Image (spheres, rainbow, N blue to C red):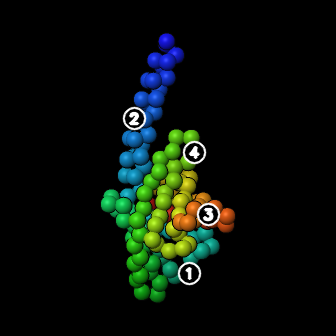
Amino acid sequence: MKTRYILYILLIFSILFTSCSKTKLEDKLIGDWEKISVGQISEGTTITWTFNADHQLFRTTTRSGIVNIDTAEWSVDNRIAQKNTLSIDNLDQYCDGKHEIHQLNDYLRLQRIEFANGHTDGSFQWNEFEKK
């Protein structure tokens, strides 16, 4: 009887903990993030991703004084036994899909693990950012 009672309490706490941490995770993500070049950005180019509370993502690319802004949608999937994931939709074929969140503090490290169509073969890609 005690074992069943303890299991119920643990289940309730895990549900409460995961729902709270999803909100905290989203709150940490909201704001401006400047992309750090890991061999993907040409010299003289800056790329900033802005995550808004309404789950809109704005990617601002500045190159030679020309500014280009793309928009997308984002969402977070909070997982208990695995790394949390960030889903990006309607940005471009290079960024759309699921990304594991490896670090989220003053730095954001993402690893794409799945394409938007659900395929995983060849989906590996790193994106690293610094909070502005």
Query: Please, which residue is most extreme toward the right here?
Result: 121
Query: Measuring 51% from the left and 53% from the top, which residue is drawn there?
Result: 85
Label 4: how many Cα within 10 Å (few below 14, some 14–19, many 20+): few
Q: Which mark, by number, is residue 119?
A: 3
Disc 2 from disc 3: Cα separation: 32 Å
Q: Nearer the viewer, residue 22 or 32?
A: 22
Give the secondary structure at mark 1. Answer: loop
Q: Amino acid at mark 2?
A: Leu
Which of labels 3 and 1 is toward the front? 3
Disc 1 from disc 4: Cα separation: 36 Å
Which of labels 1 and 4 is toward the front? 4
Pointer 2 residue: 16
Could you tell me if the residues under marks 4 and 2 are in contact, i.e. CB atoms within 8 Å?
Answer: no
Disc 1 from disc 2: Cα separation: 46 Å
Q: Which mark, by number, is residue 43?
A: 1
Q: Residue 122's spot in the image, x, y percent?
A: 67, 66
Pointer 4 residue: 82
